Amino acid sequence: MTTFDAPDALDAATKKALIDLLYRMADDEIVLGHRDSEWTGHAPIIEEDIAFSSMAQDEMGHALAYYNLLTELGEPDADTMAFGRSASDYRCASLVCLPKGDWAFSLVRQYLFDAAEGVRLAALAASTFTPLANIARKLAGEEKYHLMHGRTWIARIGAATDESRRRMQTAVDEAYPHALGLFEPTSADEILAQSGICPREADLRAQWESSVAPVLADAELKVPEGVTPQYGGRTGVHPAALADLLESMQLVYNIDPSAKW
Amino acid sequence: MTDTQWPVYEVFHQQARGEAHVHVGSIHATDPEMALVLAKEQYARRQACVNLWVVPVEAITATEYEDSDIFERGTDKSYRETWGYKTPKTVRARDKEATGE
């Protein structure tokens, strides 16, 4: 299959589809990174406080990598994209928008997201758009750690006590439909798949489902059945929580867009 | 008051393959696997790392500080010190490169 070593090699329609994909990926990362950072100073133990905060920084770093690639594709600079857009311009899935909830919810959300990112990055490592394949390979190690972290925690508290089991199952039930929203089909799917840039969302979803099922089962957690995926995020329809998050995240920028720190 | 903290694990960090693992600190964790997951972010997020060890603190047997006089030299043992040998320049350069000093 033809590879595209630089943005110039793409035709207009393919480029548009790629831009759409990168906004979805970058916005997922920055919003989840922000949500995770809300645990800084509040995680169950100090060691985990540091680990989870560090993972929040990782997600921000991933967002920046995708935003920078978007800039190369002709979009504005990263700060303008992150701080200068309103909720309806964002393309993140509802999963990352939801408030942090209890520790069980944030843990389960993070794991379900990381499993999705892991599947996507593994596929993108073979993307025909070389700059994206390079980023995917570079982020693989961090993603591997995130998955180790998630699996370790979930295996331990999933079935630890009656309360932990109840809270974890509640978190899975709540997060799962939103996690399916990470794979919301979009009008870019077909062209991205045909050009070998990124597999269809439905294919990624199937891989994700088979990767998370055994991890949840080992922790004695049930995968909810007959769930309706929570779609809308990829077309800019979000839970109200996103606008609240952006208001906080963009506060300084809105006071003075030229502020430096 | 009973200690409600998780067990303590000592953490050893290796900067490059073949080098010694160096003790860098300790953490609380439920078990060895969790200790590795947590140790990674506490002790390997800034400096280069290729390998971590975690060791339950109870596994360590130590001397008593009150016995630290056993390490003192009663008589002149300077003959044990390795000064005076000539190290070839190439070996010194390699050592310097390996330790980064």
Image (spheres, coloured by chain):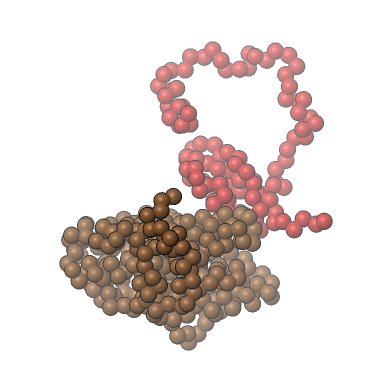
In the image: residue B9, left or right of residue A35:
right
Q: Pick whichever, B88 or A184, lies toward us.
A: A184
Name of the residue lying farthest toward the front = A255
Q: Position of residue B4 (x, y in %)?
A: 75, 58
Name of the residue lying farthest toward the right = B1
Residue A39 seen: yes
Relative vertical location of residue B18 with respect to residue B9 in this rendering, above or below: above
| Total numbered labels | 0
| Quadrant the N terminus of chain B occupies | bottom right
Q: Position of residue A88 (x, y in %)?
A: 37, 75
In the image: residue A15, left or right of residue A37:
left
Residue under the point 77% across and 33% down: B65
Relative vertical location of residue A179 with respect to residue A11 in this rendering, above or below: below
Chain brown in the figure, letter: A
Residue under the point 50% across and 45% down: B46
Residue A203 seen: no
Chain red in the figure, letter: B
Q: Position of residue A36 (x, y in %)?
A: 52, 63
Residue under the point 77% across and 34% down: B64
In the image: residue A238, left or right of residue A185:
right
Q: Pick whichever, A79 or A122, lies toward us.
A: A79
Residue under the point 26% across and 71% down: A17
Which quarter of the figure has residue A231? bottom left
Q: Position of residue A81 (x, y in %)?
A: 35, 63
Which quarter of the figure has residue A255? bottom left
